[in-house]
Amino acid sequence: MLRLLGIALCCLLPAGAMACLSPQGETGPIPVAGAELLTPNRYLVAAGGEVELPCPDAPFEMPRGFSARVSAGPDAVFDLGGMEGRILAVRAFATCPLRLIVNTGLGVWITGEPLAAGAPDSHAEELYLWGPGNGALRVWLGTEEGTGCPAEVELETYDQ
């Protein structure tokens, strides 16, 4: 009986209502080349959203204790080029507690770690990708408290 109820609920929900994170978004890709990012570039975004993580149908396994509220689609999409032989640092900064999630063009999902150095009134996370590949890099910035706040994503490359 419960199985039938689950099937009925599944089929009554609008298409896409079950997915909590989607690589599809409303933001257009920002073209960036590896050589341009040898000096860090920052991009303004908004952190937070309507999707509560963890969710049962997340496209990746979240670290233990991970929680955040994010947008269903990415907050920023970068079209990477010239990334051969490079390491890409992705950093996020905000005035509210945040969580960084990245999906690479290779289909890899990764979450950020707290960045130790930062202003006392800001929150920051970072991650590093060795050989990130060219193509789409999708970035989500979630908040821990459920309220949104202005944020910045910083991209920087290093030669391997």
Image (tube, grey):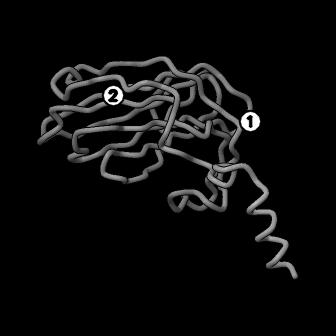
Check disc 1 and report the residue beneath it: 146
Q: Residue furthest right?
A: 1
For the residues labelled 1 and 2, the Cα–Cα distance comes to: 25 Å
Of 13 and 38, the residue lying toward us: 13
Mark 2 surroundings: few (<14), some (14-19) or many (≥20) residues within 10 A: many
Residue 137: image quadrant is top left
Q: Position of residue 150 (x, y in %)?
A: 60, 19
Quadrant of image for the C terminus? top left
The residue shown at (55%, 37%) is 73
Of 7 and 98, the residue lying toward us: 7
Q: Which mark is residue 155?
A: 2
Could you tell me the amino acid type at mark 1? Gly
Relative to 47, is 6 above or below?
below
Of 83 and 157, the residue lying toward us: 83
Q: Position of residue 56 (x, y in %)?
A: 66, 62
Mark 1 surroundings: few (<14), some (14-19) or many (≥20) residues within 10 A: some
Quadrant of image for the N terminus? bottom right
Could you tell me the amino acid type at mark 2? Leu
Relative to 148, is 131 above or below?
below
Q: Position of residue 69 (x, y in %)?
A: 67, 40
The residue shown at (65%, 27%) is 96
Relative to 101, is 97 above or below?
above
